[in-house]
Amino acid sequence: MTYKTSTLESPKPPVKAKKKKSPFREWLDSIVFAVVAATLIRWLLFEPYTIPSGSMEKSLLTDDFIFVSKFHYGTRTPKTILQIPLTHQKIWFTEIPSFLDWIQLPQYRLPGFTHVKNGDVVVFNYPGCPERPDDFGGYDKYPVDLRTNYIKRCIGIPGDVVEMQEGQTFVNGKVFSNTIGMQMEYEIETNTQVSDKVFQKYGIIEFAQELSAEDKTLYLVKATEQSVNEMKSLDFVKNITPVVQAKGDISNPNYNIFPYNSSLFPYNRDNFVITVPKKGVTIKLDEKNIAMYKGIITTFDGNDDAKYINGQIVLNGRPITSYTFKQNYYFMVGDNRHGSDDSRFWGFVPEDHIVGKAVMVWMSLDKKGSFFNKIRWNRLFSIIR
């Protein structure tokens, strides 16, 4: 006999309806996604910054809001990983540190499509200077990637000889073209007192009256060359003189500059000559080179046991007579030549401190402007040059 067998299909389990997220959960997921996306964009591509001071006047103005490209020079890998997202040094609106330095990872730079060039406007972490008595926010305050952000113009790349003669910059013996927005100090002599509105008409916002007499009035101003040239045509302007220090003039202690050794380097803010360190270049450690580069060897070049002792550099317990630089360095100066804290006063910027290239002003506010003139409309979405 033949028997037919029947196969009974097992019943499918009932499909459970997907539980709908609560409004709070949806809100939380959106916040987490936004924070992660913003963190990745800031780290990898672009980061917004605000110009806090006038060190780059008139190229960049106080309260310009800019975008800085991380991928131009190559994004740095994170070093300080125990940090609250979207913060820098402090938790918002407090003095509480936003990071822990318990874990410090080795730092690398992803490939970029260009390198720092002469004339680039660069954002970097302020390195500080071991010899500077009033140093702040630098090498001994924060990890490299959390040091205070500065923005300046690069006038010296690795290997360059940077020279300044009475305020004019030369690189490798050739004149470094001044930007249109570069400011310097000038003394303006007039035969009458000048209204603030007159200075403001010519774009001069930093000015002070020095002398007032019957036949003349003196003003000290910070202005572009274009502004002072336009003012020369005014009938009440008698004379305009650049305020620059003479070569070798070290009489004003407020203008003492790097490397703080006036006997070897009688430099001032308007006159100096300096060679920018380049990776792989070997130098002889004579008296001058030790004075100039000891901070790099002992602090910034990654040497675990390098010290400056009795006029010598001691590396791993032994005095050395020559040294080969381990990374590239840069010389950064503000376009507001007489109103900028820059490489003239604290030295070189190590390559591992470079954050990115300033590329665009996307918003600009004038806090002193009237209600309808708070926004500097002509600066919106302007390219930084």
Image: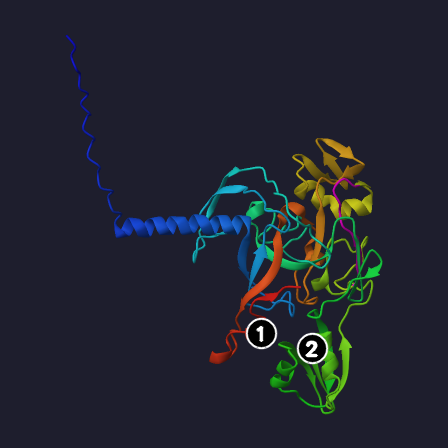
Vertically, is 83 above or below 48?
Answer: above
Q: Residues within 10 Å of mark 1 (few under 14, many from 20)?
A: few
Place residue 265 in its image quadrant: bottom right
Please tell me whether the stretch drawn in magenta is mainly helix, strand or loop. Answer: loop
Mark 2, secondary structure of its residue:
strand
Q: Please state the horizontal and vertical placement of residue 341, each as a whole percent of the image.
A: 65, 60
The residue that disc 2 covers is: 220
> Circle 1 is placed at which residue position?
378
- Where does the image place residue 1, in percent across and percent down from the top left? 14, 7
Circle nearer the N terminus (2, 1): 2
Circle 2 or circle 1, nearest the eye:
1
Magenta range: 271-281
Q: Position of residue 179 (x, y in %)?
A: 72, 67
In the drawing, does residue 28 fall left or right of residue 51?
A: left
Q: Nearer the viewer, residue 28 or 306?
A: 28
Q: Residue furthest right?
A: 173
In the rendered structure, which amino acid carries the disc numbered 2? Leu
* Residue drawn at the location 58% of the way across and 71% of the way down: 379
- Residue 216 is marked as none
